[in-house]
Amino acid sequence: MATYTLKVESVCTGGEHIGIGLYKNAVKVGTKQITRSDAITDDADLTEVIIYLIKRAITDNNANTAAKRKAAIEGVQVET
């Protein structure tokens, strides 16, 4: 099973821009820049997050059959 974690990697001097790293099993797989206002509002689109994690799981596991895709998706874990 994969474990995904987020790490704050950078904050601009003004504090408005934040670089977030996404890690799968402690290996960096991506970075996303967000703003402070995006980070503190509660209007996040959960659907976009879920779709992104599903795509990562399928790609990272080379899931090229229905059974492998099912296993990859069901193996996603998010720690908070």
Image (tube, grey):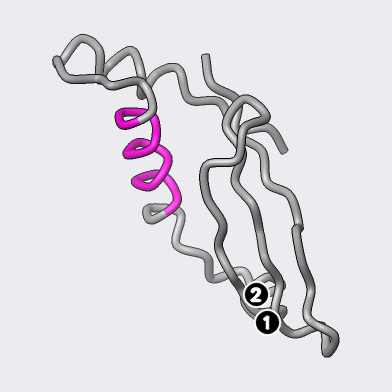
Look at the image and say whether residue 54 sits in the magenta stretch: yes
Q: Which quadrant of the structure image shows residue 10? A: bottom right
- Residue underneath mark 1: 37
Main secondary structure along the magenta-highlighted residues: helix
Magenta region, residue range: 49-59
Where 62 falls versus 53 (above or below)?
A: above
- The image quadrant where one finds the C terminus is top right
- Residue visible at 85% across and 85% down in the picture: 13
User: Residue 48 in the image: x percent, y percent?
Assistant: 38, 56
Q: Nearer the viewer, mark 1 or mark 2?
A: 1
- Residue visible at 67% across and 66% down in the picture: 19
Q: How many marks?
A: 2
Residue nearest the viewer, comparing 40 with 67: 67
Q: Seen in the image, is 70 located left or right of residue 5?
A: left
User: Residue 17 in the image: x percent, y percent?
Assistant: 70, 80
- Residue underneath mark 2: 41
Where 67 falls versus 7 (above or below)?
A: above
Crowd tier of the residue under label 2, counting other residues whose Cα lies within 10 Å: few below 14, some 14–19, many 20 or above:
few
